[in-house]
Amino acid sequence: MEKFVAITYDFHVSAISRYIPERSNPDISIFFFAYWMSITNKSEKPAQLLNRYWKITDADGRINEINGPGVVGEKPYLEPGQNFEYNSFCPLPTEFGFMKGYYDMIWENKKEFQIDIPQFRLSKPNSAN
C-alpha cells in the first residue's frame, strides 16, 4: 500500500487506503474504501485537532465536501512527539477517486491554524493506472 504524506507546521499527516470488496457492490455502483490516517506532532508545542474538512472527488469529477468536528468522535490533543491514528471509510459511486483536505488545529495560546491532509487515491485494484 502506498503511503501519502503532508507536512504543515511540523505536523506530519500520512494516509493509506484500501479497497474493501466485501462491502462493495459494483452492480449498484457502490465501492467502499477504508483509509488509515496518522497525525504526528513534530513541533515543539502541543496542539488540539478541532475539525476536519474533506474534499472527495470520484472518477466522474463529482465532488463531495465534508466538514465536521474532530475525527471519529474525538478531538485529540497532541503533545510534542505524540502521534494519533485512526481509520475510517469512504463509499464512492465509481471504482476510483481521490480524497484530500485539512484539519483545523489550535495551539495552547488559542491561535488557530490548519494542517494539510495529503491527497490520496481510492482505487479498486486494476481500475486506474
Image (tube, rainbow, N blue to C red):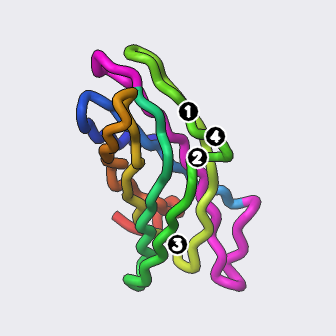
Q: Position of residue 72 (x, y in %)?
A: 65, 46
Q: Name the residue type under label 4.
A: Glu
The magenta region covers: 22-46
Q: What residue is pinned by disc 2?
A: 71
Nearer-N-terminus badge (1/2): 2
Q: Is residue 39 magenta?
A: yes
Residue drawn at point x = 24 percent, y = 33 percent: 9
Q: Which residue is the site of mark 3?
A: 95
Query: Marks 4 and 1: CB-CB under 8 Å?
Result: yes
Q: Is residue 48 above or below residue 125?
A: above
Q: Is residue 15 above or below residue 125?
A: above
Residue 89, quarter of picture:
bottom right
Q: Which residue is mark 1?
A: 76
Where disc 4 sits, the SS reads: loop
Question: Is there CB contact under 8 Å for labels 1 and 2?
Answer: yes
Other-residue count near label 2 (Cα within 10 Å), few / some / many at <14 / 14–19 / ≥20: some
Residue 58 appears in the figure: yes
